[in-house]
Image: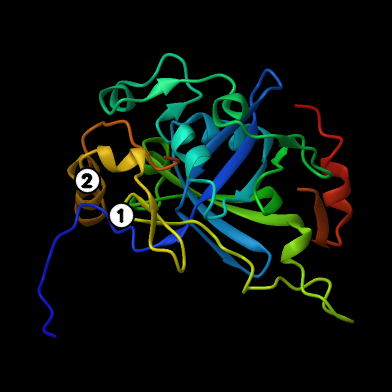
């Protein structure tokens, strides 16, 4: 089949849906769904709207939990998808139908899962949780200058994974296999072009995010090409019992649990 040149507004080819939990400055918890994430070793890169509540929380506390949604969690993800922890709602998000929600756990009917090394809770319903600490912050689409960093609309956080937990049924059985995930049982939710999919079942459910015209994201495509953009409010954080699979062997990891936020 021949290739044809196109200019899509977004390049969401398919990545796992992550529900990022973080600590608000009043001690309450925030949750933001996103899919701009990838992992290398025990590190991860996550892309977020620079003005979002989640971004502000991570920058302040240097902590978060990356909770991976399974393909049966579409209702929870959609309940969170067009909410924000920022009050008043930024203009750009308001025009796309976002609303302020203080208690994200309640609106999505999710359960806080106590963390060991970070102040914010994980999400019990998510089959995978990863407690993480901030290592470095990178600006996207800029020239690396201090001025560009101040005006950045999108930030990439490099985080170190401190602790991983999974639902018991995801652990492989057998001697020496307790720290391995049974990939045949792990069914992550995948976001592709703002729709929700599973690995084998096709489209799971209509995504509330898909109600937003893809062209609303066009400024980001322009930004990556031109290096500048008019001021807009962006949406990138789009804001069973568990058993420990693996923990980072680090004294700093143990200290993080006592941090005062």
Q: Nearer the viewer, residue 256 or 85?
A: 85
Looking at the picture, how far across and down is residue 124, in whole percent? 71, 43
Total count of labels: 2
Residue corresponding to mark 1: 193
Q: Nearer the viewer, residue 261 or 208?
A: 208
Q: Nearer the viewer, residue 250 or 64?
A: 64
The crowding category of the residue bearing disc 2, from other C-alpha atoms within 10 Å (few below 14, some 14 to 19, many at least 20), is some
- What is the quadrant of the C terminus in the image? top right
Q: How is the image coloured?
A: rainbow
The crowding category of the residue bearing disc 1, from other C-alpha atoms within 10 Å (few below 14, some 14 to 19, many at least 20), is some
Q: Quadrant of residue 208?
A: top left
Q: Nearer the viewer, residue 226 or 28?
A: 28
Outermost residue on the front side: it is 201
Q: Is residue 224 left or right of residue 64?
A: left
Pointer 2 with pointer 1, Cβ within 8 A: yes
- What is the quadrant of the N terminus in the image? bottom left
Residue at 36% x, 25% y: name it: 98
Q: Quadrant of residue 100?
A: top left
Q: Is residue 247 visible?
A: no
Outermost residue on the top side: it is 88
Q: Is residue 259 visible?
A: yes
Rendered view: 218 above or below 211: below
Q: Is residue 25 left or right of residue 245?
A: left
Disc marking residue 214 = 2
């Amino acid at each position: 089949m021949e290739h044809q040149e196109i200019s899509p507004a977004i390049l969401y080819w398919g990545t796992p849906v992550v529900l990022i939990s973080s600590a608000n400055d009043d001690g309450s918890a925030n949750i933001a769904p996103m899919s701009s994430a990838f992992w290398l070793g025990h590190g991860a890169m996550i892309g977020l709207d620079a003005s979002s509540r989640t971004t502000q929380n991570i920058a302040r506390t240097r902590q978060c939990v990356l909770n991976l949604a399974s393909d049966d969690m579409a209702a929870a993800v959609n309940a969170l998808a067009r909410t924000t922890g920022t009050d008043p709602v930024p203009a750009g998000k308001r025009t796309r139908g976002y609303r302020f929600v203080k208690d994200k756990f309640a609106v999505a009917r999710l359960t806080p899962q106590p963390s060991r090394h970070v102040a914010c809770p994980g999400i019990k319903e998510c089959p995978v949780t990863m407690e993480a600490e901030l290592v470095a912050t990178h600006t996207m689409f800029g020239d690396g200058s201090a001025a560009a960093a101040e005006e950045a609309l999108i930030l990439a956080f490099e985080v170190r994974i401190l602790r991983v937990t999974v639902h018991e049924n995801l652990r492989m059985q057998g001697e020496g296999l307790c720290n391995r995930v049974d990939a045949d049982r792990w069914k992550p939710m995948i976001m592709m072009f703002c729709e929700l999919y599973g690995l084998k079942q096709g489209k799971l459910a209509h995504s509330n995010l898909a109600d937003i015209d893809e062209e609303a994201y066009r400024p980001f495509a322009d930004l990556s090409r031109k290096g500048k953009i008019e001021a807009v409010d962006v949406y990138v954080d789009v804001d069973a019992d568990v058993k420990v699979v693996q923990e980072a062997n680090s004294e700093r990891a143990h200290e993080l649990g006592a941090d005062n936020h």
